[in-house]
Image: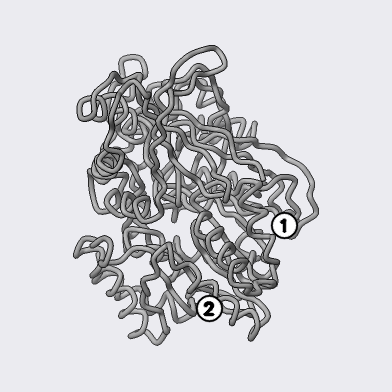
């Protein structure tokens, strides 16, 4: 894979996109949504005998000609909604390979590579998170980094007035998103001035393959004549180092832009207030966690701008923050690359339903082939006018209040709910006593705007070594591959997990659930 990567990278970097090209690419794709959907599904599903979607489509008698008629007659979203009703979809449990796909007499279980896009040439790979499994492997080709990432970032930075100043990252090395962002920035002719990483060997040693892959990407980029930065370790408790760098950049250049996780953005801004450093003119592109009202206020309080990004590894960029937002996390859905519908579904281990988001890929360069696939998130989806630059390009659908119904997220690290359930109901009672109902995990926002995951332990459990419990939690979360070890290390460094000796919380109807999303803190 990496030999192929080196041979293609020179051409990738030789011709960076202009702003005009990026605008033109997006507008053309918006005008050709139906054509792009049909072309991608025909080549990646109907002409690919191994596709699991092909099995489901054949089961309901939907040949390519039938799909084409349906899309031409009713439009993309209406056609996808009908397919969903007929059983052509994947729940998040099926998508992650945790449950069999059962549609009548059709029964199968997805393997890690079954949804790989057969139309792409893999150059890089990464993994999504899961605390027990090794996560979902996703491969990316350079075309995707160009047309699936760089074009959006370039247009957005132009609208924010941030193209003139330096662009930096505070993002992990492979298998994290750092290498992808470094190359996407280089494709728009603006390689990052700095790459800070919150993960390094002094606190956590990534696998040799990950370290070599990261160094290889940087070295090949430099060999091609593009000054890609090497990652520089900055632990979470030293966010002030990045704040100081950004303050100097703002003073010298008038602006500075940073890609990082949402909680990291808040840390940088808290350090600015503590040290009296000016960040007016700085632009934050947070991701990985919801941009809650409190987190947005923390960023804006130092004069900076926050424009959130909603991303998941298998689908890529999903939405970008509205520049005239109606709410803290109001975003524009990138409907040139994806289609989205909603379906009301029950929440695992809960007593409610949510409007789950189901995604379909439109572009042949997408990392995975998605056809009505849940990713575990729900939210508010609407079409309305806002007047910002993203609407003027053609993005009129808004996504907001995006939350996960099957996972807990903090510091940009995501662990799957079904795996957390095992820890709460099996591991902790076996190790520290009590029953499964004596433990509960609660995601909540603290008084400083940081996302925390509290482990509630009933007082009846008795004397408890809280440090030992946290160590067991982190050890269990780290089970799997290098991605899980990295995510657990970030939670450890950030102090995301904490123990509270109190009774697990009941729902309004008096039920006790092992996983609970707590109230957000108020200023």
As drawn, is 361 to the left or to the right of 249? Answer: left
Name the residue rendered at 54%, 42% in the picture: 445
Q: Who is closer to the viewer here, 169 or 359? A: 169
Callout 1: 10 Å neighbours few (<14), some, many (20+)? many
Residue 134 in view in this figure: no
Question: Which residue is most to the front?
Answer: 463
Residue 497, position as x, y percentages in the image: 39, 43
Whole-number angstrom distance, CA of label 2 to CA of label 1: 26 Å
In the rendered image, the vertical position of residue 424 relative to residue 178, given as above or below? above
In the rendered image, the vertical position of residue 435 relative to residue 235, given as above or below? above
Q: Nearer the viewer, mark 2 or mark 1?
A: 2
Residue 411, position as x, y percentages in the image: 45, 51
Callout 2: 10 Å neighbours few (<14), some, many (20+)? few
In the rendered image, the vertical position of residue 380 relative to residue 209, given as above or below? above
Name the residue rendered at 50%, 61% in the picture: 260
In the rendered image, the vertical position of residue 475 relative to residue 200, given as above or below? above
Q: Quadrant of the N terminus?
A: bottom left
Q: Who is closer to the viewer here, 253 or 12? A: 253
Residue 115, position as x, y percentages in the image: 34, 42
Q: Who is closer to the viewer here, 306 or 159? A: 306
Q: Secondary structure at mark 1?
A: loop
Tally the marks: 2
Name the residue rendered at 40%, 41% in the picture: 498
Of the image marks 2 and 1, the number of the one nearer the N terminus: 2
Residue 300 in view in this figure: yes
Q: Which mark is residue 323?
A: 1
Residue 176, position as x, y percentages in the image: 36, 58
Q: Secondary structure at mark 2?
A: helix
Q: Which mark is residue 245?
A: 2
Task: Determine whether label 2 and label 1 are within 8 Å by CB.
Answer: no
Name the residue rendered at 41%, 60% in the picture: 177
Q: Who is closer to the viewer here, 50 or 109? A: 109
């Amino acid at each position: 894979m990496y030999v192929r990567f080196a041979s293609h990278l020179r051409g990738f970097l030789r011709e960076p996109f202009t702003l005009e090209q990026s605008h033109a690419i997006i507008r053309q794709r918006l005008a050709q949504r139906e054509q792009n959907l049909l072309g991608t599904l025909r080549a990646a599903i109907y002409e690919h005998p191994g596709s699991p979607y092909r099995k489901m489509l054949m089961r309901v008698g939907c040949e390519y000609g039938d799909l084409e008629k349906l899309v031409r007659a009713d439009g993309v979203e209406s056609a996808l909604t009908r397919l969903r009703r007929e059983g052509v979809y994947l729940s998040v449990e099926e998508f992650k390979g945790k449950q069999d796909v059962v549609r009548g007499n059709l029964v199968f279980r997805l393997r890690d590579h079954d949804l790989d896009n057969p139309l792409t040439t893999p150059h890089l790979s990464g993994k999504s998170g899961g605390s027990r499994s090794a996560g979902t492997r996703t491969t990316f080709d350079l075309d995707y980094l160009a047309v699936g990432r760089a074009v959006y970032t370039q247009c957005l930075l132009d609208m924010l007035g941030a193209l003139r100043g330096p662009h930096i990252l505070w993002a992990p090395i492979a298998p994290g998103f750092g290498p992808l962002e470094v190359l996407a920035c280089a494709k728009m002719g603006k390689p990052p001035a700095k790459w800070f990483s919150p993960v390094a060997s002094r606190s956590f040693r990534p696998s040799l393959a990950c370290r070599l892959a990261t160094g290889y990407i940087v070295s090949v980029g430099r060999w091609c004549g593009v000054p890609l930065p090497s990652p520089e370790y900055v632990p979470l408790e030293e966010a002030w180092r990045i704040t100081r760098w950004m303050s100097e950049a703002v003073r010298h250049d008038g602006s500075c832009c940073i890609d990082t996780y949402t909680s990291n953005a808040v840390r940088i801004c808290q350090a600015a207030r503590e040290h009296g450093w000016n960040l007016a003119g700085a632009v934050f592109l947070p991701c990985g966690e919801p941009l809650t009202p409190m987190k947005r206020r923390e960023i804006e309080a130092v004069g900076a701008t926050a424009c959130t990004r909603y991303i998941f590894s298998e689908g890529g960029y999903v939405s970008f923050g509205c520049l005239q937002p109606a709410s803290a996390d109001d975003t524009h859905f990138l409907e040139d690359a994806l289609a989205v519908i909603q379906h009301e579904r029950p929440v695992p281990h809960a007593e409610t339903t949510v409007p789950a988001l189901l995604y379909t890929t439109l572009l042949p360069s997408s990392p995975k082939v998605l056809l009505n696939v849940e990713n575990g998130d729900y939210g508010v989806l609407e079409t309305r006018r806002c007047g910002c630059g993203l609407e003027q390009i053609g993005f009129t659908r808004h996504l907001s209040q995006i939350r996960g119904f099957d996972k807990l997220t903090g510091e940009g690290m995501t662990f799957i709910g079904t795996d957390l359930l095992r820890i709460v109901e099996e591991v902790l009672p076996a190790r520290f006593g009590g029953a499964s109902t004596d433990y509960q995990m609660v995601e909540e926002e603290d008084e400083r705007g940081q996302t925390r995951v509290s482990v509630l332990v009933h007082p009846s459990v008795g004397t408890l070594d809280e440090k030992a419990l946290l160590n067991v939690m982190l050890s269990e979360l780290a089970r799997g591959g290098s991605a899980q070890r990295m995510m657990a290390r970030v939670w450890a460094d950030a102090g995301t997990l904490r123990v509270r000796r109190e009774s697990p919380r009941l729902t309004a109807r008096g039920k006790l659930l092992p996983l609970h999303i707590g109230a957000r803190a108020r200023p």
